[in-house]
Image: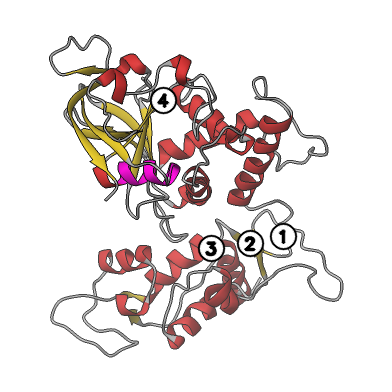
Amino acid sequence: MSLVKRAMEDAEARGWSNGPDKTVCDRHVEDDALERLIAERAEETTCSYCERSDAEPFAAPLDVLIERIGTSLSHEWRNADDEGVPWEGGYVGATYDSYDLLTDALGDIPLNHDELVSDVVGSLPDHAWAQRDYLRLRPADRLSSAWEDFGTIVKHHRRYFFAGFRNEGHDDDDYLTPGELLDQIGRAVREAELVVELGEGESVYRVRPHPPGEGYETAEDLGAPRVENVKNASRMAAAGTPLFYGALDVDTAIKEVRFADPDVEAWTVGEFHLLRPARIIDLSTAPPVPSLFDAERRHLRAGLIFLRYFFEQIKKPFKRDDRIHIEYVPTQVVTEWFHVWFKPEGGGQIDGILYGSARQSGGVNLALFIGNDGAVDAGQEPGDALLKLISHEPGARA
């Protein structure tokens, strides 16, 4: 075997070959992980692509960038021939050459300099690229599809004993049972470090509407409703299951109540303080999805892409009326699963969920897994209560 052929085969196997003897600075990349790579490996004082120079090193050898790109692509993209893409005088399916892969198929374009793109493309394997595991759904799409199936199952087939249930017609490798999906959601929450702690003394606000001239003054009245009063389902709980719904600021708490009942004329705002630290799943802001070129965090990509979709589902406006809204059953089931079965790192249980407000831009709501006895008035013995009522203030429509 000739040295040239062996070099070509070695480059194909590792995913990249050496590029020209050039240097590159962070001005020519649009990807955070690649920017950090260049900063960490900077050993040159000039850049080949903008002729910038400095007394201190700021540019990295081009091969550092090429190696990271070449080794990263294989985590989601492979040679179309190896992935079983059908061929009928041409590939029957979505394939890309290296140029189109870097400038289109990845979504976020990582490089912004034409000469740099050309140099990197010239160092990548000369084959057609296809999605890894081409005959299967992408991992994030697999989770989204499983969520749709999960909704169908718990709304129309099995509300309680559903963990291993399979919808008819789903016998392929991409199918996840409801139990498997919940495990995947829990894994994504843990790996993304979405379990946070609200400290003792943290303020939480809850608003209760009432007729003008009336009001509420006690934790019993301003806390979670009594079991006998929970006659309708909510976004996160079935009828008969009390939860404490509040917000981290007054304006959000008021807007949530006024949106739910546009005719409300008066209300009371209760400010509560946490009596102990609370472990909360923070679904208020979807965490950023790591770059494919982030070697340390790219394994989180599928889970976080799905969680961004899930976050939008859980913050959708809730309709308060006497109808039975089965569309909320999936989030009710997931909420109960978080409460009863989910185990964060280090063990223990979750006290509640933070989620974004659909009424107030930047507002954050909080659902706590407590009943009416979970809040006490100032001066009372706390017992097992999580909240203490600090103040109550009247409010009214202007």
For the residues labelled 1 and 2, say whether their Cβ atoms are less than 8 Å apart.
yes
Q: Which residue is mark 3?
A: 73
Q: Answer left or right for 199 relative to 340.
A: left
Secondary structure of residue under mark 1: loop
Compared to 84, does 352 lie above or below? above
In this view, the mark in front (1 or 4): 4
Which tag, 2 or 3, sits closer to the chain's start? 3
Residue 237 horizontal/vertical position (percent): 50, 27
| 158 drawn magenta | no
Which tag, 3 or 4, sits closer to the chain's start? 3
The foreground one among 41 and 243 is: 243
Q: Which residue is mark 2?
A: 78
Which tag, 4 or 2, sits closer to the chain's start? 2
Q: Which residues are magenta?
A: 252-261
Say which residue appears at 57% left-offset and 32% top-offset: 322
Which tag, 1 or 4, sits closer to the chain's start? 1
In this view, the mark in front (3 or 4): 4
Identify the amino acid type marked 4.
Answer: Leu
Q: Classify 10 Å Cα crowding around label 1: few (below 14), some (14-19), many (20 and above).
A: few
The label shown at residue 243 is 4
For the residues labelled 1 and 3, say whether their Cβ atoms are less than 8 Å apart.
no
Q: Which residue is mark 1?
A: 82
